[in-house]
């Protein structure tokens, strides 16, 4: 699981940098049995390791009562899509209080899914720097988020995982297969067709292989462009062509308050592309007399993901203010 831990660490680094002035509301979205809950728990733990206050919440606690969920029939895909979740209550009781101008007092659940009993618990007050990680289905249909992670898993892989997981719950393997085909994944296909959640998400993770997930995009929706400040090998055209498939546009700039150092790279793939095992690395000093020269590169969110994969674990990505006044992502020393 080394690759998984590294990729999830990159996502956690990215989320940990976000400070919008209110708790950060993060959705972990995807088709049924794509691996959303597992990923949400892993991200919550990784954020806590990075010093951010983080909490995990599941949309299981915001289902509609059974009489509403099943009013179109237990096997209805349209019923699952339209009636499974109480999105209005979730927006009112969770997302709005944690959003701009909210009082930060939010509910963690309103129903016990198994017993179908309503729950009236007092709200929890969130610290301003909280990262709330929420897993569920159809999360981009009508809800407001600060970041969205889309867990991109093929239907055939999710079906195998889900039917194995829910065999006992759904009354047997054949019943589980029928439920996924007729209800859960039929509704998920409608969601993909109508909403296009992978395109809208700010982070996309290929999760077909749990041990070897693929970071496909990070930093914004499809087509977005962000600034990446490079003081090292990413300024080299050959490295850009290898990892981005094109030469990038850039402008010279300075990173104040950071001093350049050197690190020895042991990853043979990185050495092969860069041509050296000695790479520059910068460390924060806070001294304005310390400056690091480099280039601000315009990259797509897909290319930012490729840069995350290229950089070794000695580096972490952070958001900084450059000498020109522009904000940019940069890879700094891990510690």
Image: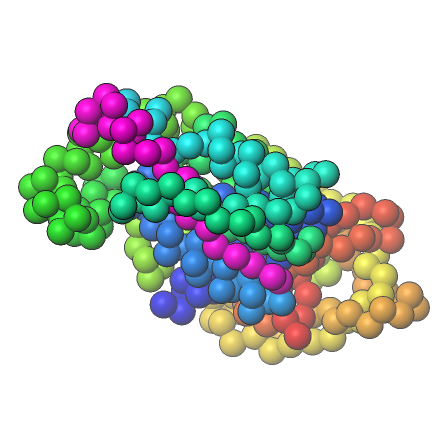
**What residue is at 35 percent from the left and 24 percent from the top?**
82
137 lies left or right of 16: left
**What residue is at 19 percent from the left and 37 percent from the top?**
180
Residue 61 drawn at (x, y percent): 40, 45
Q: Nearer the viewer, residue 242 or 295?
A: 295
Q: Say if 113 sits above or below 127 in the image.
A: above
Q: Nearer the viewer, residue 143 or 195?
A: 143
Numbered-mark total? 0
Residue 19 drawn at (x, y percent): 70, 51
Q: Say if 81 sits above or below 21 in the image.
A: above
Q: Say if 222 sits above or below 312 in the image.
A: above
- Quarter of the image with the C terminus is bottom right
Q: Nearer the viewer, residue 47 or 209?
A: 47
**What residue is at 7 percent from the left and 41 percent from the top?**
174
Q: Which residues are magenta?
A: 52-77
Rendered image quadrant of residue 262: bottom right
Residue 252 drawn at (x, y percent): 81, 50
**What residue is at 17 percent from the left and 36 percent from the top?**
179
Q: Is residue 67 magenta?
A: yes
- Quarter of the image with the N terminus is bottom left
Residue 41 drawn at (x, y percent): 43, 58
Q: Is residue 91 magenta?
A: no
283 lies left or right of 316: right
């Amino acid at each position: 699981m080394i690759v998984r831990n590294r990729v999830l660490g990159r996502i956690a680094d990215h989320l940990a940098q976000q400070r919008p002035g209110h708790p950060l509301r993060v959705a972990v979205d995807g088709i049924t049995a794509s691996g959303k809950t597992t990923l949400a728990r892993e991200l919550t733990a990784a954020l806590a390791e990075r010093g951010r206050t983080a909490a995990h919440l599941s949309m299981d606690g915001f289902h509609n009562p059974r009489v509403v969920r099943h009013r179109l029939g237990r096997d209805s895909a349209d019923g699952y899509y339209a009636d499974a979740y109480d999105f209005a209550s979730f927006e009112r009781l969770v997302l709005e209080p944690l959003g701009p101008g909210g009082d930060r007092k939010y509910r963690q659940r309103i129903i016990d899914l198994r017993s179908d009993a309503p729950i009236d618990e007092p709200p929890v007050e969130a610290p301003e720097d909280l990262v709330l990680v929420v897993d569920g289905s159809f999360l981009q249909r009508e809800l407001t988020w600060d970041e969205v992670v889309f867990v991109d898993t093929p239907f055939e892989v999710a079906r195998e995982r889900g039917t194995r997981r829910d065999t006992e719950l759904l009354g047997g393997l054949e019943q589980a297969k029928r439920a996924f085909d007729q209800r859960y994944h039929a509704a998920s296909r409608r969601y993909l067709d109508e909403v296009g959640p992978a395109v809208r998400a700010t982070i996309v993770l290929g999760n077909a292989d749990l041990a070897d997930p693929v970071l496909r995009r990070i930093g914004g929706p499809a087509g977005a462009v962000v600034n990446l400040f490079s003081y090292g090998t990413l300024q080299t055209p050959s490295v850009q062509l290898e990892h981005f498939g094109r030469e990038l546009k850039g402008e010279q700039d300075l990173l104040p308050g950071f001093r350049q150092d050197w690190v020895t790279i042991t990853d043979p793939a990185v050495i092969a592309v860069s041509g050296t095992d000695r790479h520059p690395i910068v460390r924060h000093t806070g001294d304005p007399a310390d400056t690091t020269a480099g280039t601000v590169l315009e990259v797509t969110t897909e290319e930012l993901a490729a840069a995350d994969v290229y950089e070794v674990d000695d580096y972490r990505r952070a958001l900084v203010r450059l000498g020109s006044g522009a904000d940019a992502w940069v890879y700094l020393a891990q510690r």
